[in-house]
Amino acid sequence: MLAEQSIARRPVDALRGVDARVLLLTALAILAFNLRTPMASLPPLLVAVRGALGLSGLEAGLLTALPVLCMGLCAPPAHRLAHWFGSETTTLWAIGLVAAGLLLRLGGGSLSLLFVGTLLAGVGIAACGVTLPAIIKQRFPNRPGAAAAAYSVPMMVGASVAPAIAVPLAHALGSWQASLGSWALPALLATVVWAPMARRGSRPHRSTLGAPGRLPWSSRGAWLLAGFLSVQSMLAYAYLAWLAPAYESRGWSAASSGALLGVLQLAQLVTALTLPALVDRMRDRRPVLVGSVACTVLGAIMLFASPGSMPWAATTVLGFGLGGGFSLALVLLADLSASPDAARRLAAMTFLVCYSSASVAPALTGALHDATGGYGSPFAVLACLACVELALATRFRPRLRGAVT
């Protein structure tokens, strides 16, 4: 009789398990949507912000770079918080910080409030960047690709939607402050949706906790991933900042160059959605990873060598490569980690290195443009960086799985 009851309960337990995973993926997607909107919503409004607040070029550059710097510098402290309080709970606090920072932007008429709000949002984004890979490693050990897609695709959607509607929102709501602050609404929604995940999440027992593990600075696999993501992020942020201005300098209208940037973002969504789930069926990730990064190389070379011939095609190919490279890097992060705690430590080290590097890429690209008076040399350097990324992609052998302990 007991055996029959046990058998009868198994389908129900399985269903509950499936339902729990679906709910977690949904909450993960809603949360991830908010991890790029604080950064992406600002650039289209930067002219209005500078005019209203009298920002210098240095101050404006710092305002746009601040979240990316936070994503790098705040990653190690986020790892320590997650060690003591658990990944799910730390994620709840983090998305709450993003919402609070965006609400402070409603008072953007005050320069200090604008900077503090941007800083808080950046800290929250940094913490989520560390905790979400650990949650994926723990909750989806056999399907990291599908979970990585649920994380990366909504994040890219947010990065695409926010700049596209930032100016229309400012017109509709009556001010650039309201446009920047309106992104607090989806962040608040994510906070509400994630709260049950934090309550159900595993909490470390203080009596059994030791000191937080050290970041894997001595691991070759960790440095390989950090190098790969550094080049990937430098390319992504450099093209995000300078692709549209490059074509405006060639006589394109602001609307046309903005549409070209939109194509870059949309193309990234395609590969971010499809490739992680594809590699779940493959033991060796390299064929798909190398193919994706080869698209980055091809697109970068086309934009450098023949910028006027097929810009739409070149930008689409480039977007395929950038989207695939980033989403597959999240899968590799899960692959290289032997445990959820190892995933947090690896994410902390990787994001510290890659986002610190990425934060200076747009400025260095701009400085090279100023020095040469054109975009040929900057885009040539970016094409060379893409070749470096391709060389690194070939090194992710299956034997590296679980290398970070």
Image (cartoon, rainbow, N blue to C red):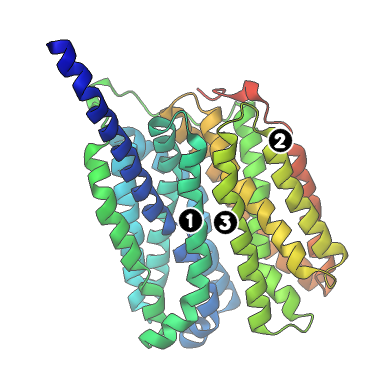
Residue at the image position 43 percent from the left and 37 percent from the top: 136
Residue at the image position 46 percent from the left and 56 percent from the top: 154
Residue at the image position 48 percent from the left and 60 percent from the top: 36
Q: Disc count in the image?
A: 3
Residue 110 in view of the camera: no
| Occupied quadrant, residue 350 | top right
Give the x, y percent position of residue 187: 34, 61
Determine whether 102 is above or below 124 in the image: below
Give the x, y percent position of residue 404: 54, 25
Q: Dot 2 corresponds to which residue?
A: 287
Q: Identify which amino acid the numbered label 2 is placed on.
A: Pro
Describe residue 314's horizontal placement relative to residue 88 as left or right.
right
Q: Identify which amino acid the numbered label 3 is placed on.
A: Leu
Q: Dot 1 corresponds to which residue?
A: 155
Q: Dot 3 corresponds to which residue?
A: 269
Describe residue 322's horizontal placement relative to residue 341 as left or right.
right
Determine whether 194 is above or below 363 in the image: above
Q: Identify which amino acid the numbered label 1 is placed on.
A: Met
